[in-house]
Image (cartoon, rainbow, N blue to C red):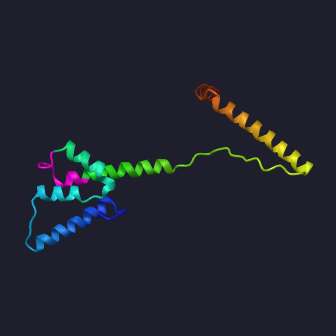
Amino acid sequence: MKLGESIKKMFDRFTNIVNGFKALGKVYSNKEMVKKLINSPSKYWEAKVTTIEESKNLDELSLDKVMGSLLACEMKLEHGKEKTRQVGVVLNFSIQEESNDDDEEEEKEEDNEEVTILAKKFKRFMKMDKGKRFQERKIIS
């Protein structure tokens, strides 16, 4: 398996190689193909491959089931990556270095006060009983 290659692309290459051997007269049994497929993923997949080997009897396992297990693992990993990519909204502010100007200091103090007030209102909003508030809206409607 190549670095960064998906399981589907790896399986397509594997199938092409096996078909090439068939054309040359070398035929592999299902058991041999399963063992070769299990050994072909990169080190990244080592834990998943070990789990498949331990949980299933490789002698009776079909090539399609191995492929299905690897694809399922890949899909779970991709789904996990998508969740970590989601971005939340965060209130962020920074206090700049103090300067000698009185006007700038007053503006900074006002900005800090506004941010403090906004943060307090946001905390209060988050603490509200949302279920109760939803029921009140429903009754009014």
For the point 20% across and 47% down, the residue is 53
Residue 36 in the image: x percent, y percent? 18, 59
Left or right position of 61 against 3: left
Residue 14 in the image: x percent, y percent? 22, 65
Was residue 58 drawn as part of the magenta stretch in this picture? Answer: yes
Left or right position of 122 against 19: right
Give the quarter of the image for residue 136. top right
Location of residue 6 with respect to 130 vertically, above or below: below
Was residue 49 drawn as part of the magenta stretch in this picture? Answer: no
Left or right position of 63 against 69: left
Quarter of the N terminus within the rendering: bottom left
Location of residue 104 with respect to 28 vertically, above or below: above
Residue 131 in the image: x percent, y percent? 58, 27
* Count of marks, rendered view: 0
For the point 13% across and 71% down, the residue is 21
Mark yes or no: residue 141 visible.
Answer: no
Magenta region: 57-67
- As rendered, which of 128 and 86 lies closer to the eye? 86
For the point 72% across and 37% down, the residue is 119
